Image (cartoon, helix red, strand yellow):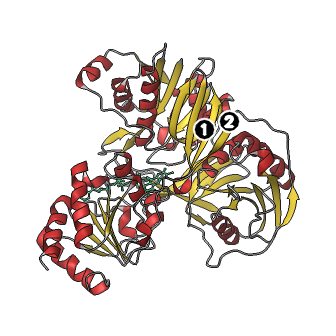
Amino acid sequence: MKSLLVAEYRDGKVLGSIGDLLGFAARVGGDHVMFMVGSEAALPPYTGKLYLADAAAHGEYRPGVHKQLLLAVIEKEQPDLVVFSHSSYGWDLAPRVACVLGFAQVSEVVDYVDNTPVVPVCNAKLRRTVAVKSKGAVLTLQAGAFGLSEPPSGSPSVEKVQIDGADRVEFLGYEAAEAGGIDLSKAEVIVSAGRGIGKAENISLIADLAKALGGEYGASRPVVDSEWAEHDRQVGTTGQTVAPKLYVACGISGAIQHLAGMKKSDFIIAINTDRDAPIGDVADVLAVADLTKLVPVLVEKLNAR
Amino acid sequence: MKILVCIKQVPDMESKFKVAADGRWYDTADLAWRLNEYDEYAVEQAVLVKEQGGDTDITVLSIGPDKVKEAIKKALAMGCDRGVQVVDNEVSQREPLEIAGIISRFAKDKGFDLILTGMQSQDRGSAQVGILVAEMLDMAGVSTVVGFSLAGAKLELKRELEGGVKARVAVTLPAVVTCQLGLNTPRYPTLPNIMKAKKKELLSLPVSDLLQAEPRQQTAKVYFPEKKGGGLILEGEPAELADRLIQIIKEKTAVLA
Ligand SMILES: Cc1cc2nc3c(=O)[nH]c(=O)nc-3n(C[C@H](O)[C@H](O)[C@H](O)COP(=O)(O)OP(=O)(O)OC[C@H]3O[C@@H](n4cnc5c(N)ncnc54)[C@H](O)[C@@H]3O)c2cc1C
């Protein structure tokens, strides 16, 4: 078994998802090599062969060019598995490579049992094992599913690759995250509102509970997308990562992108009408209840103390 | 400008799921179905382009059994011009490559300038179809788009990356764009528009006419993950639950000390 691990580089840095790639490689065993469009000034912590293409010459987001570079490396290395992170880079590039290569692509792999990828279905309520019928496979790995217990180390032996490729997608630059006034990463108590709050007015219930517990309120993405809360209150992969002493998730299903931002909280309470909501997998306590009924009573009792 | 929007019908994610008898998907009986959330943004974006003016024509396509017509009708009521159902009762067992193959066979030679899809479906979550369609039709493809601005044949887009960072990119039409949550604010169809939608054309095509790609993968088994367990589940009246929660917060955290 040979794997080609596709590392990610952005704006001068190797991204942290490298730990998942290496954790996966350790899990499946066999040989592996790595590929990255990046720079010699920031090499990934890796002991092995790294095919390095220069990001300055090939662009950081030029999927057509990166595809050609990868295909050249694949031609040379003949891997059985081409492994990406399930990220904005991976899910854009992986299908392009799989399509040309004739490999199956299996997205958002959370486990790998007996050479078979396992992926979530329906917001992680179900799981699915996938039988690959092609001679190799392209996988994208869910963030954190294969992490290493120790941070990776080492330095690679670099082999440079380059091509003269053109792309129809022109990269114009990055836009930084909106810098907001609320820094949830410092809050000791966070009460977050999910879509289950039902309407904008109910944000005040969540804000009241946060206040009664001496903390701040946060929100899941649909709440922010609906403009019921400001973007700097969003918890998750595309929002803030938090680790308070107490996290209360109100009407939040527990999608992986939300969990990624809050599962390091010391103690997690979920309030949800759905007993089977995936948030139950990370919560210390799941109160099966309608938040619009429970939260006001909770606030009243806390304030009466 | 000719636009194709590809949509999928999915169950409400809050449903109580059961594994189907053959063990290879969820049981589709007794579920409430809706338009895939990500696709709502795609439909809305197409309608916004039409509202920018110019001669714009929007076709909305969905693959599946007869009930997917409900999703198509919603898209028509939101403002798409015509619907196409690719009739396929086996759709849940098709892999993304086959779905993309069906779409691209349909789209080939029809001269679409813009193809919009959601970035992923809520049930299967593969996030592959849009980009595969771009590859198969040899068009530019941009995924996970949260910002969209069209001037002439030039499209400026914002892709969402991790941690709130965005990448600004530009492409010239024709292009395939996959839409991420928050791209716009999908409208609710109004009653007059629902009535008007009933008169719009809705074509049905058999999947056998369009199926081309050979599957490279197959679902082996669908099952419930083992509950991680350990977590306490509380049920009861609000007052009683509130007391229990306050007691637990006192015992297990330093928050109410
Ligand atoms: C690339 C990408 C990045 C993303 N980034 C983020 C991110 O940073 N943060 C984020 O949160 N999401 C993110 N998402 C979205 C994520 O996948 C989910 O869609 C989102 O987290 C769901 O939010 P939710 O739990 O509030 O809503 P839903 O999933 O709709 O869940 C609502 C929950 O409320 C419960 N409920 C309903 N009514 C009540 C009631 N009256 N009382 C109690 N409970 C009730 C329901 O049972 C359900 O469990 C991202 C998605 C993608 C694809």
Quadrant (top left/top right/bottom left/bottom right) for the N terminus of chain B: top right
Mark 2 surroundings within 10 Å by alpha-carbon count, few (fewer than 14), some (14 through 19), many (20 or more): some
- The secondary element bearing badge 2 is classed as loop
**Residue A193: percent from left, percent from top:** 31, 59
Tell me residue A179's x, y (percent).
48, 56
Q: Nearer the viewer, mark 2 or mark 1?
A: 2
**Can residue B223 be seen here?**
no
| Extreme-front residue of the structure | A181
Q: Is residue B181 above or below residue B89?
A: below
Quarter occupied by residue B173:
top right
What amino acid type should be assigned to the residue bearing mark 1? Val
Query: Which image quadrant is residue B110 in?
Result: top right
Are discs 2 and 1 less than 8 Å apart at CB?
yes
Instruction: Estimate the x, y position of residue A271 in percent, counting from the top left.
Output: 27, 65
Q: Residue at (64%, 55%) from the top-left corner?
A: A139
Relative placement, left or right, of B8 versus A7 is: left
Q: How many marks?
A: 2
Residue B254 vertical position relative to residue A255 in the rendered view, above or below: below
CB at disc 2 and ligand 1 closer than 8 Å: no
Specify the label residue B142 is tagged with: 1
| Residue at which label 2 appears | A169
Q: Nearer the viewer, residue A89 or A176?
A: A176
Q: Position of residue A269 (x, y in %)?
A: 31, 72
| Amino acid beneath label 2 | Val
Q: Residue at 43% across / 30% down in the picture?
A: B43
Q: Secondary structure at mark 1?
A: strand
Chain under disc 2: A
- What residue is at 78 percent from the left and 49 percent from the top? A56
Please state the quadrant of the image where ligand 1 appears.
Answer: bottom left
